Amino acid sequence: MKCTVLGCGRWGSFLACFHSRNHEVVLWGREGSRSFETLRETRKNDYLVLPDAVRLEGDLGAALEFGDVIIISISAQQLRSFATRLNGYPIAGKTVILCMKGLEAQTGKRLTEVMRESVTQPIDLAVWVGPGHVQDFLAGIPNCMVIDSADRALTERIVQQFQSELLRLYIGTDLIGTEIGAAAKNVMGIAAGMLDGKGLSSLKGALMARGAREIARLIRAMGGNELSAYGLCHLGDYEATLFSSHSHNRRFGESLVRGEPYDLLAEGAPTAKALVQLGKEHGVELPICETVHAILYEQADAEAAFQKLFFRSTKEEFYL
C-alpha cells in the first residue's frame, strides 16, 4: 500500500517513519516552512531521522497522486483552507485519515464536518486519535489509539492495515464522541498546566474526574455516546496530556499563568472557544472549559477563576 502523509511536524514526520516500516511512504511539507526545510537539508528534526524509505516531497500534487491512503497532520485551524485546496487535485476514491485533534474555533465544527463541507470529491474519511507522544514511541514505548469513521467497514480496514505492536489500534464506534473527546482533552491539558503553574497539581485528579464528566454531558447532548469520554479519545489520553512534560497544551497552560513565553502549538487554546460555543448551543454546562476560556480570552485572573470554579454551588457528582 502507498501512503502519503501531509504535514511534517513532529507527529506527521513520526507517522511517515512509522508507516515506512511496512508501506511505501511520501511525506509532504510546505516549501519554505522551517520544519520542511530542516528535513530537506538534514533529513532530521528535533525528534527523529527520516529513514531512506521515506520520500520527502514539496509538490502537493505529486504527494497526493502517490498515496492510496492520505494522512493529514496539520493544525486544526488550517484544515478548512487546506481541504479546499485539495479540490484542485484528483483525490476521488482515496482514503483520508485525519491524525489531528481539535475543533474549528469559529464554528465549533468537528474536523470531519469541516472536511465534508470543504472537499467536493467523494473520499473515504476517518480519524486517528488517542494517547501517545512521539518521544515515547521513538523510544519503543507502546500505546493504544482509536480509529473512527462513519463507516464501520472502513474503520476496520484501517485498523487491520496499520495495527502494530507499537500502536495497538481500537475500532471506534462513535465518531461524534471520538472527535469531541479528542479535541476537549487538549483544553483539559491547558487547565492542568495552569494548576501546575499555580502549585495546585494535587487537584489534577479532580480535574480528570470532573473534566471527563462535563465532556460526557456535551457528547450526549450532541447525539454521541457519553461513554466515549471515558475511552481512549479523552480520559485515556489524560496521562499524556495532563501530566507529561512532552505535552504542548500542559506546558502552554503552565507558562501562561507564570507569565512566561511559549511559542509551540497548543491546539487546546482555539478549541476552548469552540467548546464554549457548543456548550451554549446545546445547553450544557462546561465549567472547566469556561474557566480556561475566561483566562485565555477574557483576561480573568487564573487564581480567582479557579477559586470560583472550585466554589461553585454544590451538585450531585453525577448530575445530568
Image (cartoon, rainbow, N blue to C red):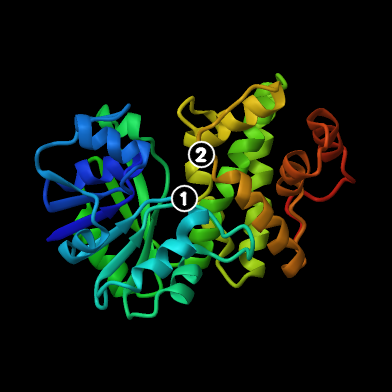
Residue that label 2 marks: 265
Q: Position of residue 238 (x, y in %)?
A: 52, 39
Q: Are marks 1 and 2 in contact (CB under 8 Å)?
A: yes
Front residue of 102/106: it is 106
Q: Residue at x 59, y 31 (%)?
A: 252
Q: Amino acid at mark 2?
A: Leu
Q: Is residue 156 left or right of residue 256?
A: left
Q: Is residue 205 above or below residue 175?
A: above
Residue 266 placement: quadrant: top right
Residue that label 1 marks: 75
Few, some or many C-alpha atoms within 10 Å of disc 2 (few <14, some 14-19, many ≥20)?
A: few
| Label 2: element kind | loop
Q: Position of residue 255 (x, y in %)?
A: 63, 25
* Marking on residue 2: none
Q: Amino acid at mark 1?
A: Ser
| Label 1: element kind | loop
The quarter in which the N terminus is drawn is bottom left
Q: Residue at x 34, y 43 (%)?
A: 32
Front residue of 290/238: it is 290
Front residue of 165/19: it is 19
Q: Is residue 121 left or right of residue 100?
A: left
